[in-house]
Amino acid sequence: DRLVTAAADGEDQAVEAALRPKQLDEFIGQERVREQLSLVLQAARRRGTAPDHVLLSGPPGLGKTTLSMIIAAELGAPIRITSGPAIQHAGDLAAILSSLTEGEVLFLDEIHRMSRPAEEMLYMAMEDFRVDVIVGKGPGATAIPLELPPFTLVGATTRAGLLPPPLRDRFGFTGHMEFYAPAELQRVVHRSAALLDVEIDPAGAAEIAGRSRGTPRIANRLLRRVRDYAQVRHDGQVTREIAAQALQVYEVDARGLDRLDRAVLDALLRLFGGGPVGLSTLAVAVGEESETVEEVAEPFLVREGLLARTPRGRIATAAAWQHLGLTPPVQAAG
Ligand code: ADP
């Protein structure tokens, strides 16, 4: 239920389909991945063959699903969408693979969360377009080889490092998705506003972009909340002021920190003088579980250079004091 989480919620899923760019040249930012992918796709089209399998790695909300749909669209191929956690048994994967049509794109989200036997089946399918379907159990079990039509796997993972090397090696191309620059996010906000029929000026779009943590999904979500505010409290137009007021209501600050992030920083600074302080002590001080502080709040604070994890505990940086408008204690000389 956090406004600034990068994971998709129910509302996102309903609206995102309408906001997804449909072609590569509509896709904003990620210049390197876009250029590399464009070459892979054009070459495949010229040769008239299915392109190499593609791995997209990067944090949630940066456009991996969107890119997989664009790949299919650019190839003029249908797409099947599934995810690692949905494939618990090798049989689940065999059922999907054996129903693919020639040239189809298979998008496998969170590919690092597939079960081991399914993963091994996938190796063979990717390399030889073949699977062995096991029929029966125990000593009487037999493997029936099954030919597959050539297809293109697009795998997505938040952590390419978690993939077993044999799986990683079977992708011809890996695209590393980066967090978006503010100017790119501003373009994302403008584009989405146009699709949602929201009037927004450049400063309003920049204000939302700056609070979106480098993530288009968050930018689109903040835009929807700002739109609500603009329509209910004002005439619907989004300016810098309206955007800032709206996001203040939702407790998303100028840098994209929310209530929890600020509570953690605030405790670290005010109660512990900027640290070092142990994770569990810090968690008790904000009334949260250690895991919540560590997994939900800290990654962004670390990324923003506001908090550092050291062997002696958590410490605040100079930027943290500045961000909360506090003065760091003067270090005793000597
Ligand atoms: P992921 O699969 O990496 O979690 P998605 O592809 O689902 O991310 O993207 C989340 C949302 O952000 C989608 O609604 C999509 O429209 C938007 N989005 C992502 N990347 C871009 C981009 N480069 N340009 C425009 N919109 C984008």
Image (cartoon, helix red, strand yellow):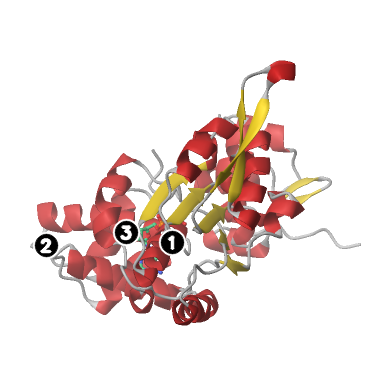
From the top left corner, tell me how far across and down residue 118 is, in percent. Answer: 62, 38
| Residue marked by disc 3 | 220
Disc 3 is placed on an element classified as: helix
Observer-nearest residue: 328 or 213?
Answer: 213
Choose the circle earlier in sequence order: 3 or 1: 1
Amino acid type indicated by mark 1: Gly
From the top left corner, tell me how far across and down residue 179 is, in percent. Answer: 52, 66
| Residue marked by disc 1 | 103
- Residue 1, numbered label: none
Observer-nearest residue: 39 or 235?
Answer: 39
Viewer-side label of 1, 2 = 1
Question: Can you say whether 237 is above or below 95 in the image?
Answer: below
Amino acid type indicated by mark 3: Asn
> Quick one: label 3, few (<14), some, or many (20+) residues within 10 Å?
many
| Residue marked by disc 2 | 236
Which residue is at a point 68% across and 36% down the rendered structure image? Answer: 116
Choose the circle earlier in sequence order: 3 or 2: 3
From the top left corner, tell me how far across and down residue 62 is, in percent. Answer: 46, 61
Do the CB atoms of the residues marked 1 and 2 lie less than 8 Å apart?
A: no
> How many angstroms separate mark 3 from mark 1 (CA)?
32 Å
Choose the circle earlier in sequence order: 1 or 2: 1
Which residue is at a point 49% across and 58% down the rendered structure image? Answer: 151
Instruction: State which quadrant residue 186 falls in.
Output: bottom left
Q: Quadrant of ligand 1?
A: bottom left
> How many angstroms separate mark 3 from mark 2 (CA)?
16 Å
On the rendered structure, is 51 left or right of 331?
Answer: left
Which residue is at a point 51% across and 75% down the rendered structure image? Answer: 37
